Structures are given as C-alpha cells and as structure tokens.
Image (cartoon, rainbow, N blue to C red):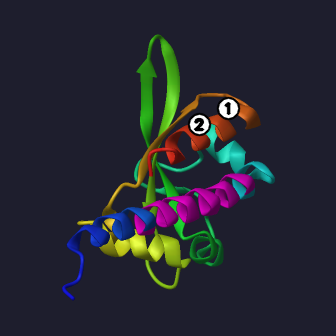
C-alpha cells in the first residue's frame, strides 16, 4: 500500500503547532525573568548605546535565556515616545526551542525575532505588556 501523502501536511501542522506552543511557554519564562527582577528597568531607561545588549547582560544569563534584547533607538508613535529593542537569538548552547528557531532563520544570530516597543520612562507593567505583545508574533 502506498503512503498517503495527505498525512504529511497534518503532521507538519501538528509539529509546527507544538513548536509554537513550546516557544510561547519558553518566552513566558523569559518575560517573567525580566519583570521579576531589576531587569525591567533596562527597558524603560536604557543604559546602553544603540546596538548593544540591554538585557540580559551576563554571558551566563544570555546562555540560559537564549535570547537578548538589543537597544535600537527611541521612536515616536502617535505622539508617544518608546524605546525600541530588537530581540535576537544568542549563539552557543541555548535552549532547544531557540536553537531550532535560530537554525531556521536566514541570518542566524543576527536575525531579529521580534521588535519590542516599551514606553519611555514606563513601569514594570508596561515592560511586561510590551514583551508579551512582541512575543505573540514569534
């Protein structure tokens, strides 16, 4: 009996759905790590220059979280000023869900996974909302 080619599509859809669910769960832990400590302050008042990593700063944390948020610039939308960050995958040994994403990305560690807009001089809740909004599209 010949294999049913129609079965390949549902299996691929299920696989991609599982990866998406795994990614969302992982990113929820990243968001929690940012807002549960002083890291959220780096998003409302960046202390790094353009193109530099605002969070996480230490190599150990970068490896553990698998992603970094590089400060890009201030932008104005609808009259409100935001700090714009680019979320990028880290190199090296990172969580498997990030490694899978990174390997599929055309630019690897230079690929932007998401852009995060945080209100300038905002608060912890603003950072959490901005991260959750940005992470939805990954």
Q: Is residue 42 visible?
A: yes
Say what secondary structure mark 1 lies in: helix
Q: Is 134 above or below relative to 27?
A: above
> Quick check: is 26 in the magenta stretch?
yes
Residue 114, percent from left and from top = 43, 48
The residue located at (23%, 83%) in the rendering is 3
Residue in the image at 68% along x and 40% along y: 128
Taking the spot 19% from the left edge, 85% from the top edge, the residue there is: 2
Q: Nearer the viewer, residue 104 or 21?
A: 21
Based on the picture, tell me whether residue 90 belongs to the magenta stretch: no
In the rendered image, which residue does mark 2 sit on?
130
Report which residue position mark 1 lands on.
Answer: 126
Looking at the rendered structure, the number of numbered marks drawn on it comes to 2
* Residue 56 visible in the picture: no
At numbered mark 2, what does the secondary structure look like: helix, strand or loop? helix
Assess disc 2: are there few (<14), some (14-19) or many (≥20) residues with their C-alpha within 10 Å of its C-alpha: some
Q: In terms of depth relative to the viewer, which is nearer, 8 or 114?
A: 8
Q: Which residues are magenta?
A: 15-32
């Amino acid at each position: 009996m010949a294999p049913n080619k129609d079965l390949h599509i549902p299996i691929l859809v299920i696989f991609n759905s599982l990866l998406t669910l795994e990614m969302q769960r992982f990113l929820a832990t990243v968001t929690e790590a940012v807002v549960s400590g002083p890291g959220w302050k780096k998003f409302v008042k960046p202390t790094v220059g353009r193109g530099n990593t605002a969070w996480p700063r230490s190599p150990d944390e970068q490896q553990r979280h698998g992603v970094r948020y590089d400060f890009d610039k201030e932008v104005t939308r609808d009259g409100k000023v935001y700090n714009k960050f680019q979320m990028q995958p880290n190199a090296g040994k990172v969580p498997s869900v990030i490694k899978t994403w990174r390997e599929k990305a055309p630019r690897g560690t230079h690929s932007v996974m998401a852009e995060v807009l945080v209100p300038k001089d905002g608060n912890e809740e603003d950072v959490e909302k901005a991260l959750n909004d940005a992470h939805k599209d990954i």
